[in-house]
Structure formats: structure tokens, C-alpha cells
Amino acid sequence: MASTRPFQEKILQVLSLFSLVRGYNIVVLVLSQYLTARFILDPQTSWLDLILDFSFFSIVTASALSTAAGYIINNFYDAAKDQINRPQKFVLEHLVSQRKQLALYLLLNVFALLFASLVSVRAFFFFFFYSFAIWLYSNTVKRLFWLSNLFSALLMIFPFWGITLYLKNFESVVFYHAAYLFFLILARDIVKDLENLKGDWVQRYKTLPVVFSVITTKRIIALTLLLCLLPNYFLILQPLGLMHYYFILGIPFLGMVLLFLWRAKDQKAYLWIHNLIKLWILIGVLSIALIYQKL
């Protein structure tokens, strides 16, 4: 039994790191960038050419590393409120000391900038700005009323502008996709504020539920989800193959989320809504591969 204990501790530390850098989100980010590039931004390029494009690989890697670093620094500044809102998750993620977390944060950012510099000077400054913006959000903006939600949603779609600039595709369909994703992420971020209300109130974060009320916040989320229908409408009109049905089904899905939202009364219910929106984003990412598929 004694010999298995160090092994178990290693496994727990690996799980702690995976949770700390939001490994699931990083995998989805990388996958979505490659699918977006292959089927939306540069459909003429084959999978082989895209995979062998070292500059594109470097941009995706820089995005993944800097985003992972962002999750670490965000976790570092949110430690006090996470101890209240998610005590079990807090214990798991703090199996890695805060000193080691900061060291890993710096290391990931350094490697992100190294990969970006292999592409161009502009790419280097793009990701330098991205890393700085994440730190600014975690250290200051996150406590600011309303601006925190907008800033967070913009940061989530920022890596996609990196590959958009690299592939130089500025067609309207790209902006429709970006707008749809932005409003979904914004709604999810505000739902998280409802989920984290107790810890935010104790730590004096000026989130929408803290400043206003739960009912007012639900109305703002409802408005944000309804705004998704604007880019959704234009995307339905686009020749997107079988992905066309994703946006059609998005209408009743968002209606279902709104129904659950109005009935939700506790942290567990808000967590379900948060995960429903997260699931819909994942389905959307996977649906990108269906753009050129027809019945």
C-alpha cells in the first residue's frame, strides 16, 4: 500500500494541473481552430497542407499556451472566492502550490511568445497583447461592473482573430460565426455570475447579480441569448451544408435554455444551464466539419 501512495499523489497532481489549465477547454480550442481554418477560413487548403503548415501550428500552439496560462492566473486571483463557490475543485487545483502555479504561468507565456515569434513580429505582439489583456482581466477588470463579462467574452474569441488575420479571410460569414459565438459565451459568462453569486458577494466582485438582482440578471441573459438569433438568422441563409441544421436547431435549443433559466433557483441549476450552453458550443465546433456535407 505504501508503494502506491506516491503514484496516487502523482495522478492527483496531473489531475490538478489538467483542471488548473482547463485541459478540456484547451483541447476544444485547438480542435475548433483547425476546423475553423479548414472549413471556414481556408476551405481550399487540404488537411495535409494545413497540418504541415508550421506557421499555423505555431499560432495555434501560442493560442493554447497563452490561454492555459490565462486560466492559471485567473485561478490564482480567484482562489478566495473559489474556496467558497467550489470547495472540492479548489482543493484539487491547489494540490499545486501557488508558487508553482505562478512559475508555470510565466513558463507557458514565455513559450507562447516564442512560438508566436517564429511566425512574425506582428504575431509576437498580438500574443503579447493577448497575454497582457488576460492578466489585466484577472487582476482588475474582473471586479468591474458589467465590463468584466464583455471583456471575458472578447478574450474567449480573441485566438480566432489570430488565425483569421493569418489566413486573411474577412468575409461576412466569418463575422456572423464570431458574433454568434460571442453572444453564446457572453450568456454563459453571466450565468456563471449567478452560479458564483455567494463567493462574488463575499469578495465584493461587482457582478450583475451582486449589483442588481437575480431577476434582472436573468433578463439580461435572456436578452443576450435572443441577440444570438441575429447572427443565427444570417447563418441559416448561408450555404453551410449540414451545419445549416445546427443553427436551425439552435432556435428551440435557446428557447429551452431560457425556460430552464427562468425556473432555476440554486447554484446546481445554474451549473446545469452553464453546461448546456457549453455543450451547445462544443456541438457547434464539431458541426463545422459538416459544412460541405449534404443529405
Image (cartoon, rainbow, N blue to C red):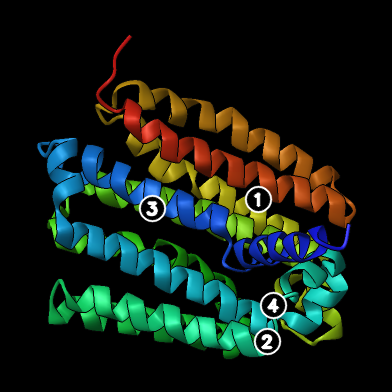
N-terminal of the two: label 4 or label 3?
3
Identity of the amino acid at label 2?
Answer: Gln
**Dot 3: within a 10 Å radius of its alpha carbon, few (fewer than 14), some, or many (20 or more) residues?**
some
Which secondary structure, mark 4?
loop
| Up/down of 163 relative to 48, above or below | below
* Label 3 close to label 2 by CB (< 8 Å): no
Q: Residue at x 66, y 41 (%)?
A: 276
Q: Earlier in the sequence, mark 3 or mark 2?
A: 3
Cα distance in 3D space between marks 1 and 3? 30 Å
Residue 122: percent from left, percent from top: 16, 79
Residue type for callout 1: Ala
Q: Which residue is mark 4?
A: 96
- In the image, residue 5 sits, relative to residue 44, either above or below, namely below
Q: Which residue is mark 3?
A: 30
167 sits left or right of 3 in the view: left
Q: Which residue is tagged 2?
A: 98
Mark 1 or mark 2, earlier in chain: 2
How far apart are labels 1 and 2 at the CA level? 37 Å
